[in-house]
Image (cartoon, rainbow, N blue to C red):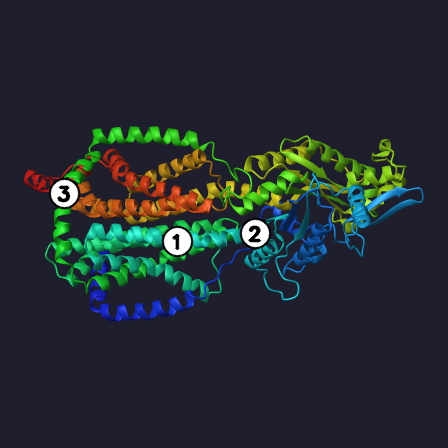
Amino acid sequence: MPSPKDRWVDWYANTLIAKRRWLILFFAALTLALAGAASRTRLDAGFFKMIPLKHEHMQAFSEYLTVFPGANRILVNLRWQGDGDIYNKAFLDTLRKATDDVAFIPGVDRTRVSSLFTPDVRFIEVTERGFYGDVIVPPRFSGEPDELATVRRNVAKSGVIGLLVQSNLKGAMVRADLQEIHPQTGDKVDDVDVAHRLDEIRKAYASENIDVNIIGFPVLMGELVKGLTGVCLFFGIAFVITAALLYAHTRSLKLTMVALVVALLPTVWLLGILALAGYGIDPFSILVLFLTFSIGVSHAVQMTNAWAQEVIAGADAPSAAHSAVRKLFVPGAVALLTNALGFAVIMRIEIESVRELGMTACIGVLLMIPTNKVLLPALLSHIRLERGAMTKARGAAAKRGGLWWTLSGSAARRPAAFVLLVCCVLLAVGTAGARYLTIGDIGDGAPELRASSQYNRDYASIVGNYVVGVDVLAVVVEAKGYEDDACLHYPVMHAVDRFEIFMRGVHGVQSVVGVPDMAKVGIAANNEGNPRWQALPRSRRALQQGAGAYNPDLGMNTDGCTAMQVLIYTKDHQGATLAHIVEEVKRFKRENAIPGESPRIDLSFRLAGGNAGIMAATNEEVARAEVTMLLSIFGAIALICLITFRTWRAVLCIVVPLAIASILCNALMAALGIGLKVATLPVIALGVGVGVDYGIYLYERIEHEMAGGAMDFRTAFYEAIRQRGTPAVFTALTMAIGVGAWAFSPLKFQADMGILLAFMFLVNVLGAIFLLPALAAWLLPRCQRRCSGAQTQADLRRVTP
């Protein structure tokens, strides 16, 4: 007697075939509407979208964002290529114009623009009459030789060499901070537009004698957006490869076109829905669109293959579509729901860009349920399979029969034991290799781009010519409870000074800048510049001699020194370097508990920002999120499989191959030098989401063939792989070849994603074909593995080639 589930599926299939014409018209109208909306899709990159704002370090960053900016910083460096150094009229005129152009870029905080031509950059000297200071460049600078000499002297006295002027005096920098919200319009600052304007500055001032180097988050986003042309090209190549292989597989132009169109529809619908909802596409989420297409192809091939088998067996098109829906609706819907739930768990990660990626993937997969389980069979019911395709399918089925029967040997216990042994060895190797996976960036510059990219060349040029470096980790020292200026209390200044000295000895730290150091310079200057006085005096009155360093306008402290900033410039921003520095900061805090002068006084060190500080916090969040994500996605898959198949054995048979593939992927990332970060974190989830389809389709067919003891386990697996294995292997190979072509992309993060996804596709399908039956051969009870007698030797000979 049919189960309630079977009766419901029969009713659904009958209704679908009866209403198929109306359904096709409805989907056509819906596609036209959403395609029109998709044309308005925009890119939506944002600096704060990449930050885990709920991380403990980022709470301090958010609290002091308006007081201590600088995390989203733009550096524009002009290098003199001609004879001599920068002290010539041509270079300084160019620097002045570039400073003005940078200051007037929409979104740049004009009060936070610094160069030799801005009023915040000054020199101070001690003369017989006392202190004297002024701006670096005279107000009416005309480039005369005496004025050039004055600028040279002022720069030497200002202390900006290595900060705003190259150490070799062959270049000077414009430094600017970018805001998230435009103060005049209230709109979000467009990073891509900022990148375009910076690129115009590069073109305007780059010449035979002057080279322009520009780095910063907007510039990185601009490079990624430029690379999207290549991304689209490689998407097109992957699409053509998929179409060619699909046609070679089916020899049917009709089936090829229908499968590709239906696989593309969720992507078009997704873009339209996002545009209607007011969302854009983050550059790092672009690759999800192709993943949506890949999953769509996988399910479309399963449906068209099931339909073609029925047609070859003699059924007409509507009857074949009806039968395909009955066979594939439950496993296909379960697989898609599992994918969607797996992608949904990515949204638990407290990084907005990753959440958007999870949301995009989840919606895209859910859209495949109506396109694949409703529209595709409705279209197939109107198709007449070509005679050549039928002949090709019959011949191919006969040839593959022998191969599938041979591969089904892994369902016997002895071969299964060998398969399990091999998998245990791979698991051990993968586990050992995955231990070397680095959290965060590996290498210098932006790992999302090739080493030869303009951005990474500019980064190397700037880092190599400035003392302090470009990566800074900011620590905020809070001194609360003082009724007057905390900078005038020796215990506070001494504690900060000890912290600075400690951090200078940490491996990976290039330099440290803080209020005590600046105060020491002022105190020595007040004592005839004697270096012996360059220390922190214990008396309040003596500390007042360094009052110039306590000015909030310098951006190092707040009024009353209730918060002081210590800037730790790092040698690079690699994950291991930042993790070590952050751990040393935490160790200092643990080992140097600093008592206040009274119970009401609180002195604390808080990791609070800087671009390196944000990277460090992001790396910590990624490390935590990896464990949470894997537990969530495998828990979700296990739960749905348990509800569907109602046995823990099915859960293990489906989940274990996916888990081993994930571990091997981590080992591959470590071997290829790919760090685990925001851009690569979702690879495992996406790979698992695609791979789980193979296991669910195969296990459902095995269970169906073994129902009532009609077949033994090996024969049931043979039937399952004969019906479901061919489209699974074809899809895996096709998608692996398609994404494998990404390895030649100019964007390194796309190349890395292509390699990893191709690996995940292949390993997951191999796990479904070999490891799943091997596990079932040892997990299923003997009474289930052997035929109950309903199947005769003649039946076995019939299915055995």
Precedes in sequence: disc 3 or disc 2: 2
**Where on the picture, by quarter, is residue 598?**
top right
Residue 133, given in percent of the width and then of the height, sits at 85, 48
Local secondary structure at mark 2: helix
What is the spatial separation of the Cα atoms under label 3 and label 2, in whole angstroms? Answer: 55 Å
The 10 Å Cα crowd at callout 3, few under 14, some 14 to 19, many 20 or more, is few
Q: Residue furthest right?
A: 129
| Vertical order, 12 against 231 (above or below) | below
Q: Of the residues shown, which amino acid type is indicated by label 2?
A: Val
- 222 displayed left or right of 23: right
Per the image, the residue denoted by label 1 is 233
Q: Of the residues shown, which amino acid type is indicated by label 3?
A: Lys
Tell me, yes or no, whether the two marked residues, 3 and 1, touch with CB atoms within 8 Å: no
Q: In the drawing, what numbered circle is on residue 399?
A: 3
The answer to which of 743 and 290 lies nearer the viewer is: 743
Q: Of the residues shown, which amino acid type is indicated by label 1?
A: Leu
Residue at 43 percent of width and 43 percent of height? 752
Q: Nearer the viewer, mark 3 or mark 1?
A: 1
The answer to which of 520 and 164 lies nearer the viewer is: 164
- 556 displayed left or right of 397: right
Local secondary structure at mark 3: helix
- 463 displayed left or right of 798: right
Residue at 66 percent of width and 49 percent of height? 70
Q: In the drawing, what numbered circle is on residue 219?
A: 2
Residue at 62 percent of width and 33 percent of height? 508
Q: How many marks?
A: 3
Precedes in sequence: disc 3 or disc 1: 1
Residue 604, given in percent of the width and then of the height, sits at 71, 41
What is the spatial separation of the Cα atoms under label 1 and label 2, in whole angstroms? Answer: 22 Å
Local secondary structure at mark 1: helix
Q: Nearer the viewer, mark 3 or mark 2?
A: 2
Residue 744, given in percent of the width and then of the height, sits at 40, 44
